[in-house]
Amino acid sequence: MQQPTRDSYDVIVIGGGPAGSTAASIVAREGDHRVLLLDREKFPRFRIGESLMPATYWTFKRVGVLDKMRESAFPTKYSVQFFSGDGNSSAPFYFDEFDDHESAQTWQVDRVDFDKMMLDHAAESGVDVVQRANVREVIEEDGQVTGVRVELLEDGSERHIDCKVVIDASGQTSMLARRHGLKQIDPKLKHASYYTRFRGAQRDTGKDAGATLIMFTREHKSWFWFIPLPGDIVSVGVVAPVEHLASYGTADLQAVFDDELENCPTLHDRLRGATQEGDVKAIRDFSYISSRIAGDGWVLAGDAFGFLDPMYSTGVFLALTSGELAADSALDALKHGDYSAARLGQHGPKYLAGMESMRRLVYAYYDPKFSFPRFLKQHPECRDTLVNLLVGNVFRIDDSDMFAKMSGMVELPEPRRLASEAEVPS
Ligand SMILES: Cc1cc2nc3c(=O)[nH]c(=O)nc-3n(C[C@H](O)[C@H](O)[C@H](O)COP(=O)(O)OP(=O)(O)OC[C@H]3O[C@@H](n4cnc5c(N)ncnc54)[C@H](O)[C@@H]3O)c2cc1C
């Protein structure tokens, strides 16, 4: 049975998804620190969210998994293409349109294999990885985190383990955000998704074979993703407001999925002759952020901080990026012996600003009166910025001019801010 090897660590990471594995690997590889990663599940385990953004490249490179990705069987993704409800499509957005570096392409991953690869890599990087370890409580003394109480599920035993920093990467469980009442749900993006997989769907060929397709249904009330995976499998899911899916008045997920599919002619054609693999499943798909990204002795990463509608496949990219940024802040805190919220959350404003850019794009795309092809026809000079955002270069470019022009055509949300954006002592 796996056990933590010590009673005290520098950093404890809760959760071994992409955010947690990344954060743990970086702290262990770059800081010569003692790192423990705890996950309550046994990997390989399923997760939704297969389509990556190209900018994940830089985190893969830093963490040291780029060669593993290159050698994998994951299909290469060069573009994303959007279809309206009447079947009209934008031209594919090729990520290498303005930059043909290797980082302008990415992969469609089966999360069962991808998450296990990332977790194994964390262990190879020197992280103490313990699975089937359910963190029951993050222990705080006088408002400062001092460790965790964890239940080892193999034998039901409990351990108290001390640490200087907790990185909460517990996904939508959002352990610390819930405990501190920080979770803020986006009232306009309360969605759910019904999803499954198909074998033998009609896929594009050549450079388009690995493209993500986003297809609206006829009345623009819902949209489907179509994500090619290894073998002859595609991941297909429909996303819609909760009340739209509930309006069917049935708990028969398959029946609702089939009705939605009937309403999406482009996808319907592609699935003719394909065989469904497995039941239709449902997942809540609410967008949210936490009003703070850090406290004294703790920092949030990935879905544990925030989640954005999957329209642009931002989830894993944001998990990797925030894992990386949380690791940087934790390394800085360890270097200075300062585990304050200000130091552990120093990256928060920059990170949230990037998330907000993608949220503005989500709002624009959901507005039935707005059309990206029309916008680009009026403002062709904005295409470079838009492609950069679809690549995930959201933390690297200035997109203010594009959003100023876009706001003349569509109502965009005001950027949110974190509750406390204190200065970090130098
Ligand atoms: C409908 C839908 C479609 C999506 N499509 C995409 C997509 O195409 N592309 C994309 O990039 N993203 C997509 N996503 C988002 C993506 O799934 C997530 O953003 C991503 O998994 C977040 O990674 P994470 O590491 O933060 O959390 P997770 O991957 O959820 O990992 C969290 C881990 O924490 C562990 N954990 C939780 N609580 C505890 C505890 N108390 N103790 C110990 N361990 C704990 C869990 O077992 C889990 O392994 C989609 C999401 C939805 C809802």
Image (cartoon, helix red, strand yellow):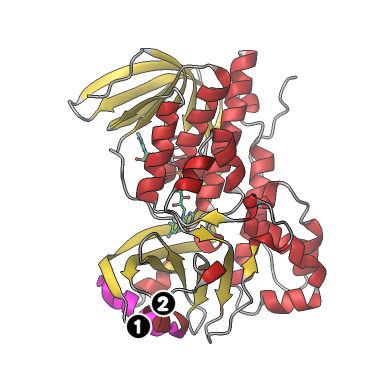
The residue segment tinted magenta is 251-265
| Residue 373 shown in magenta | no
- Closer to the camera, 381 or 99? 99
Reply above or below: 49 against 330: below
- Circle 1 or circle 2, nearest the eye: 2
Residue type at tag 2: Gln
Q: Secondary structure at mark 2?
A: loop
Local crowd size for mark 2, using a 10 Å CA cut-off: few (<14), some (14–19), many (≥20) = some
| Residue 253 shown in magenta | yes
Q: Rounded to the nearest whole Å, what is the CA distance between mark 1 and mark 2?
A: 8 Å
Q: Kindly identify which residue carries mark 2.
A: 202
Q: Secondary structure at mark 1?
A: loop
In this rendering, does residue 184 appear at all?
Answer: no
Question: Is 304 on the left or on the right of 255, as rendered?
Answer: right
Q: Kindly identify which residue carries mark 1.
A: 272
- Closer to the camera, 296 or 395? 395
Residue at image location 39% in from the left, 66% down from the top: 234
Residue type at tag 1: Arg
Reply above or below: 408 against 145: below
